[in-house]
Amino acid sequence: MQKIRLGLVGDNIAASRAPDLHHAAAELCGIDLTYERLVPKDLGLTFDQVIARAKADGLRGLNITYPYKEQILKFATIEDPAVVAIGACNTVLFHERTIGFNTDYTGYIAAFRGRFGDIRPGVVALAGSGGAGKAIAFALAALGATSLRLFDVDAQKAESLAKTLQNARPAMSVDIALTLEQACQGADGLVNCTPLGMVGYGGNAFAGIPLTGRKWVFDAVYTPLETPFLKESKAAGVDILGGYELFLYQGVDAFELFTGRSVDAAALRRILG
């Protein structure tokens, strides 16, 4: 059996459990697979050089994480119109061409429905309009959010995402907030798509913002499993969706793209613990 070689490209990924997930999925499917962390700075290479070397070395594909989900687009052919609209991808397959996908988008939809069932997101305040924020914003639109309020410290990113969303989803109200506090006024759900709270970053994007009365919150960060944002939300009695759920479901989707094999999310969860 030919060994499948995969990797994860990103900064600050020492604590990532992506290798564990793909090795566990491979074990469930009886596949010989390796999955390695590829940090450009640690390798003494640029991001572009890491991508070129991975392809030349025979890796079948890569997961792409912060802060490269938009930079990868120049190397990838995107066939899915939804991913074209999102403008970011987190998974690439190397064939004759490099094909790009976004399993954050599909994985978030599965994670949200798995946690909350058929409820709609309502009015949502979203912090962060980068690669993860774009995918989650489009997923929230697909889930039936009535209104999305965007805040990013880089206002141009929020403006660009708002314009793209309004073109793709004209029925959904999209607003750009001058502050996160403004975005959160009257919001049913609060969503963190910034790296704040992550191991190596720390902090809480929603620090000081009232949580009582919110219907749900989501934090894209999953290292650690319980971020300050999630801990405070749980203490306030708010239903939470942790970043681990997105990690799990996007990983299931990515594994199927890489290998052609589907893996049961519940079985994978049991192995990962």
Image (spheres, rainbow, N blue to C red):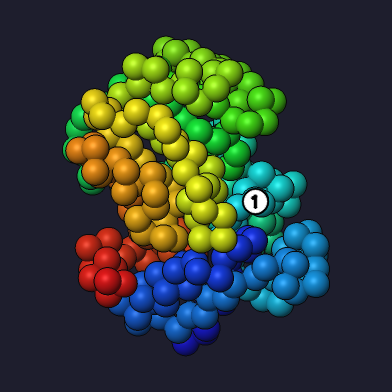
Residue placed most toward the observer, 257 or 196: 196
Q: Which residue is mark 1?
A: 67
Residue placed most toward the observer, 231 or 117: 231
* Image point (30%, 77%), residue name: 28
Q: Is residue 74 above or below residue 176?
A: below
Place of residue 100 in the rendered image (x, y in percent of width and height, measured from the top left)? 60, 50
**Location of residue 189 (image quadrant):** top left
**Location of residue 22 (image quadrant):** bottom left
Circle 1 packing at 10 Å, graded few (<14), some (14-19), many (20+), is: some
* Image point (48%, 73%), residue name: 19
Q: Amino acid at mark 1?
A: Pro
**Location of residue 208 (image quadrant):** top left
* Image point (75%, 60%), residue name: 47
Q: Is residue 164 something one can see in this rendering?
A: no
Q: Is residue 89 above or below residue 265?
A: above
Q: Is residue 207 something one can see in this rendering?
A: yes
Q: Is residue 46 above or below residue 68?
A: below
Residue placed most toward the observer, 3 or 215: 215
Place of residue 60 in the rendered image (x, y in percent of width and height, measured from the top left)? 59, 70
Q: Secondary structure at mark 1?
A: loop
Q: Is residue 145 above or below residue 199?
A: above
* Image point (41%, 56%), residue name: 222
Place of residue 135 in the rendered image (x, y in percent of width and height, measured from the top left)? 50, 39
Q: How many numbered badges does the structure rendering display?
A: 1
Pick out the residue farthest to the front: 208
- Quadrant of the frame with the C terminus: bottom left
Residue placed most toward the observer, 213 or 101: 213
The answer to whether residue 131 is left or right of residue 217 is right
Place of residue 173 in the rendered image (x, y in percent of width and height, measured from the top left)? 44, 13
The answer to whether residue 144 is left or right of residue 38 is left
The answer to whether residue 131 is left or right of residue 44 is left
